[in-house]
Image (cartoon, rainbow, N blue to C red):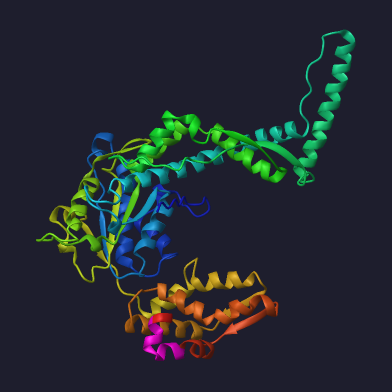
């Protein structure tokens, strides 16, 4: 699941000037608590900045200190790593260790995580380059649309009379074209239809399996048979706004150098990539007997060279993993980190334990982060004229119910809050469009009325909350 998160210019401070304390402060804006984990990732990010200042021969020897996060689900492990990647503008990928199998078993091989991370980086760099050429692309597209609306005339015979006539026609053509340009920029031609050549995006329905995997072989086939894969075009009639988007995408793709994008992306992966391996505890264990789960230790041994540092072949070229930062995470409520093979344990020298969330933490999660749940629901309902507000007692009551259900059933951390809020606001969300604009105040009594019957019935709460 590639996740590309470049920081926006207004949010991203100059990375070289960010101290570990400032990095933690930035993470505090989005993730509540977990000071130890934030401190560990802040040091890891700062060490990358320090490494870039070293002489090349010294920097080559300095490898990242990978991190193992230990803690129950829903306490912020993934979000900390994701926000770190956003803060640094690094290519980021989250994978689940449980979906990989060792060589010889049916399933995805571990090298595919590096290929997916490279794909994420290519998308990130391509968007950056397209943003750089967007102004030029928009200018070119405007000329293309004007050519469709008013095709240029053909040159005539070179006589004196024909030259005068051609001059007058050219002047009239330029005048008409400028009028069309003004109307186009003003949006007056939005309903006009034009014919545009659109590249077909159909692909043959077959796969080729190899030791490299489908994701590598299908690209090789595209290179060998370029006319078979998406190079055909067809003419489509569409409105000018839609045609502008289609032409703009094609023009940006034409202006961006794909080889430069691939080179920059692979360099960025090798120097700044972050791979988040979730559910590492699901492959922990060293089996002494053969059985259906015999591949768990095999997966660990396959992941080991990736984490140690190896070269992975991708369609964009070889990618070395020596300086990729690996962050592994798991609940470890059944197994423990010592159940991992010793070699893999040694590649995650930094261990941080994330604390279970308290009631106060849940209250803060509901209200403090920039993307707090309460703010999200208030924004959604405000689109239909509903101004929803919550009393402090109501927020505290929802946090208390979430804690009780987590303790009585499975502890899923802050994810329980989404279920609680959906239950509290169910009727309001359902009836919102029908009753018109109004202000609604949610108090503690309303929360108890909605949740108390479910919380009392343990069997029911297992299904609903």
What residue is drawn where x is 21% and y is 71%?
334
Taking the image as shown, residue 44 lies to the left or right of residue 463, namely left
Location of residue 67 by image quarter: bottom left
Is any part of residue 465 visible from this angle? no
Image coordinates for residue 379, horizontal then vertical, percent: 59, 69
What residue is drawn where x is 54% and y is 69%?
376
- Residue 329, compared with residue 271, is above or below; it is below
What residue is drawn where x is 15% and y is 56%?
341
Image coordinates for residue 138, horizontal then vertical, percent: 65, 38
Query: How many numbered marks, from 0 up?
Result: 0
- Residue 296, compared with residue 247, is above or below; it is below
Using the image as rendered, state which of residue 9 and residue 172 is in the foreground: 172
Residue 436 belongs to the span the image colors magenta: no
Q: Which residue lies furthest to the top in this view?
A: 159
The quarter of the rendered structure image containing the N terminus is: bottom left
Using the image as rendered, state which of residue 338 and residue 351 is in the foreground: 338
What residue is drawn where x is 46% and y is 45%?
124
Using the image as rendered, state which of residue 406 and residue 215 is in the foreground: 215
Image coordinates for residue 208, horizontal then vertical, percent: 36, 40
Q: Which residue lies furthest to the right in this view?
A: 161
């Amino acid at each position: 699941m590639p996740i590309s998160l470049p920081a926006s210019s207004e949010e991203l401070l100059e990375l070289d000037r960010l101290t570990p304390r400032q990095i933690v402060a930035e993470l505090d804006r989005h993730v509540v608590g977990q000071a130890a984990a934030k401190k560990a990732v802040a040091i890891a990010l700062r060490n990358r900045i320090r490494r870039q200042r070293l002489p090349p021969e010294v920097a080559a020897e300095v490898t990242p200190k990978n991190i193992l996060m230990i803690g129950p689900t829903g306490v912020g492990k993934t979000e900390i790593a994701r926000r770190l990647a956003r803060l640094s503008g690094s290519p980021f990928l989250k994978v689940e260790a449980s979906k990989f199998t060792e060589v010889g078993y049916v399933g995805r091989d571990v090298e595919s995580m590096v290929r997916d991370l490279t794909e994420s980086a290519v998308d990130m760099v391509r968007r950056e380059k397209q943003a750089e050429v967007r102004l030029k692309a928009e200018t070119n597209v405007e000329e293309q649309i004007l050519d469709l609306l008013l095709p240029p005339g053909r040159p005539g015979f070179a006589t004196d009379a024909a030259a005068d006539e051609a001059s007058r026609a050219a002047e009239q053509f330029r005048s008409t074209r400028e009028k069309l340009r003004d109307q186009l920029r003003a949006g007056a031609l939005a309903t006009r239809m034009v014919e545009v050549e659109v590249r077909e995006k159909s692909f043959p329905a077959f796969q080729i399996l190899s030791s490299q995997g489908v994701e590598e072989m299908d690209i090789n086939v595209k290179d060998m048979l370029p006319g078979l894969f998406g190079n055909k075009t067809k003419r489509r009639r569409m409105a000018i706004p839609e045609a502008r988007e289609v032409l703009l995408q094609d023009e940006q793709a034409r202006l961006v150098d794909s080889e430069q994008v691939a080179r920059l992306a692979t360099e960025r992966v090798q120097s700044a990539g972050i791979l988040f391996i979730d559910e590492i505890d699901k492959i922990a264990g060293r089996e002494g007997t053969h059985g259906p789960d015999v591949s768990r230790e095999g997966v660990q041994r396959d992941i080991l060279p990736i984490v140690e540092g190896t070269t992975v072949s991708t369609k964009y070229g070889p990618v070395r993993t020596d300086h990729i930062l690996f962050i592994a995470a798991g609940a470890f409520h059944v197994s423990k980190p010592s159940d991992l093979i010793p070699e893999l344990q040694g590649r995650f020298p930094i261990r941080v334990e994330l604390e279970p969330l308290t009631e106060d933490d849940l209250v803060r999660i509901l209200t403090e982060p920039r993307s707090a749940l309460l703010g999200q629901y208030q924004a959604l309902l405000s689109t239909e004229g509903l101004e929803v507000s919550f009393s402090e007692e109501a927020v505290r009551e929802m946090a208390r119910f979430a804690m009780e259900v987590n303790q009585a059933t499975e502890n899923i951390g802050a994810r329980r809050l989404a279920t609680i809020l959906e239950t509290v606001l169910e009727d309001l969300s359902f009836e919102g469009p029908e009753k018109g604009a109004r202000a609604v105040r949610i108090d503690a009594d309303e929360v108890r009325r909605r949740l108390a019957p479910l919380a009392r019935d343990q069997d029911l709460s297992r299904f609903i909350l």
